[in-house]
Amino acid sequence: MTPPRNRANEEAFPKNDRGTGSLNDYKFDMIPRSAKLRVQLAGSDPYQDELRTVLEESGTDVFTAGGQRTIEEERTDAPMELRLFTGRRVSGIVGTVPRGLEPAFVEALVRLERANKPPRIPAEIVKTRNGLRLEVLIGQTRDV
């Protein structure tokens, strides 16, 4: 079964930079169905230099930084932009959460905070034929 199409992503980003993910991958309470669930960020093409810098500096240990939207961003339904925390610094913007998946990301951050853990979701920078992409390992927040 194919997941429903996300028209907001289709209009905002080129075909090879729309990210991946579906609300079908989550239970009713926005908990990932699988601990292996990954979500690829959308809109990473303009941030290739930033992704390359983070990859060279940090290697593999990267985590999302931020992700919570301000009240003004919520009011205007602005995209949720993500930055990376590399242990030493916070990067610039590296992409946006695919439209429609914002509630799943917010809920993952809330779960981490409730468990008295830093609100950082593990991530991995992967090389694709279309450039570098960030995959957020959101499934690892499942059993927090």
Image: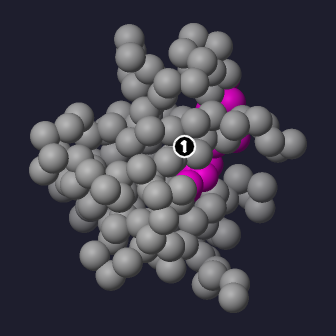
Q: Is residue 45 magenta?
A: yes
> Residue 18, percent across and down?
66, 59
Q: Residue at x 50, y 24 (%)?
A: 61
Q: Does residue 64 appear to the left or right of 12 in the view shown?
A: left
Instruction: Specify start and end residues of the magenta stretch as a single range.
Output: 38-50
Q: Which residue is at the front of the view, 19 or 137?
A: 137
Q: Tell me if residue 81 comes above or below residue 46 in the rendering.
A: below
Q: Residue at x 54, y 15 (%)?
A: 58
Q: Which residue is mark 1?
A: 95
Q: Which residue is at the front of the view, 1 or 51?
A: 1
Q: Residue at x 13, y 50 (%)?
A: 114
Q: Is residue 96 magenta?
A: no
The N terminus is located in which quarter? Answer: bottom right
Q: Does residue 127 appear to the left or right of 7 in the view shown?
A: right
Query: Given the image, on which type of amino acid does mark 1 rest?
Result: Gly
> In the current view of this chain or complex, which residue is farthest to the right?
129
Q: Does residue 102 appear to the left or right of 117 in the view shown?
A: right
Q: Which residue is at the front of the view, 11 or 61?
A: 61
Q: Tell me if residue 6 comes above or below residue 88 in the rendering.
A: below
Q: How is the image coloured?
A: one colour
Q: Quadrant of residue 88?
A: top left
Q: Is residue 136 visible?
A: yes
- Secondary element at image label 1: strand
Q: Tell me if residue 133 comes above or below residue 75 in the rendering.
A: above
Q: Tell me if residue 98 comes above or below residue 90 in the rendering.
A: below
> Residue 128, percent across and down?
80, 42
Q: Residue at x 65, y 69 (%)?
A: 11
Q: Is residue 80 visible?
A: no
Decide: few, some or many residues near mark 1? Use Cα within 10 Å; few <14, some 14-19, many ≥20.
Answer: many
> Residue 100, percent across and down?
45, 71
> Residue 107, percent across and down?
27, 61
